[in-house]
Image: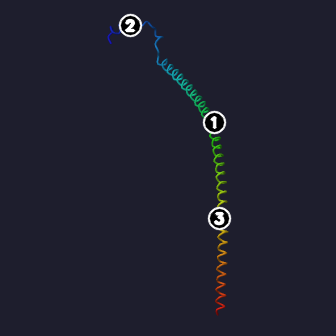
């Protein structure tokens, strides 16, 4: 840069002293200060997010607990209804089976009586045939 250009440039600069210029150490100190402020802001954000997460988790946990309590009650009621219905159905089936067994027992007694009478008739017939055959001899 020429001397004339340098002189023009110096005239264009505002009138400040050397104390108004930043040194490397000033910039390093400012950088550290800004990093510290950023770290503090990040820590505050992290703490706030953690608190919100804990709060939301607690709300969700309470909500889920309430839902599970309601579900448990509903299942208990439904299972009681199913148990009652099964008990009623089993009682009805038991009555039907008892009636069927009673009918079967009656039918078996009737058939046994008929078989006994048939055997008695056959035995009588055989005895008659045997007596008749004995008289013929």
Q: Is disc 2 surrounded by few (<14), some (14 to 19) or many (20+) residues within 10 Å?
A: few
The percent coordinates of residue 39 (x first, y second) are 54, 25
| Distance (Cα) linking label 2 and label 3 | 126 Å
Q: Quadrant of the C terminus?
A: bottom right
Q: For residue 73, what is the image quadrant?
A: top right
Q: What's the mark number on residue 12? A: 2
Q: Is residue 2 above or below residue 46?
A: above
| Closer to the eye: label 1 or 3 | 3
Question: Which residue in the structure is indicated by mark 1?
Answer: 66
Q: Earlier in the sequence, mark 2 or mark 3?
A: 2
The percent coordinates of residue 1 (x first, y second) are 33, 13
Q: Nearer the viewer, residue 124 or 49?
A: 124
The percent coordinates of residue 47 (x first, y second) are 58, 27
SS label for mark 3: helix
Q: Is disc 3 surrounded by few (<14), some (14 to 19) or many (20+) residues within 10 Å?
A: few
Q: What's the mark number on residue 24? A: none
Q: Residue lying farthest bottom? A: 137
Q: Nearer the viewer, residue 133 or 31?
A: 133
| Distance (Cα) linking label 2 and label 1 | 75 Å
Q: Nearer the viewer, residue 98 or 120?
A: 120
Q: What's the mark number on residue 104? A: 3
Q: Nearer the viewer, residue 31 or 56?
A: 56
4 with respect to 62 (left or right): left
56 with respect to 2 (left or right): right
SS label for mark 1: helix
Q: Is residue 103 above or below residue 43?
A: below
Q: Earlier in the sequence, mark 2 or mark 1?
A: 2
Residue at horizontal 48 percent and vertical 19 percent from the top: 27
The percent coordinates of residue 98 (x first, y second) are 67, 60
């Amino acid at each position: 840069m020429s001397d004339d250009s340098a002189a023009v440039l110096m005239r264009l600069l505002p009138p400040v002293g050397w104390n108004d210029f930043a040194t490397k150490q000033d910039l390093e100190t400012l950088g550290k200060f800004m990093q510290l402020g950023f770290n503090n802001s990040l820590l505050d954000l992290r703490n706030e997010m953690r608190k919100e997460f804990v709060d939301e988790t607690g709300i969700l946990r309470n909500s889920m607990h309430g839902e599970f309590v309601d579900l448990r009650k509903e299942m208990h009621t439904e299972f009681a209804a199913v148990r009652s219905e099964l008990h009623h159905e089993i009682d009805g089936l038991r009555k039907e089976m008892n009636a069927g067994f009673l009918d079967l027992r009656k039918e078996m007694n009737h058939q046994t009586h008929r078989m006994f009478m048939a055997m008695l008739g056959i035995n009588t017939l055989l005895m008659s045939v045997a007596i008749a055959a004995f008289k013929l001899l």
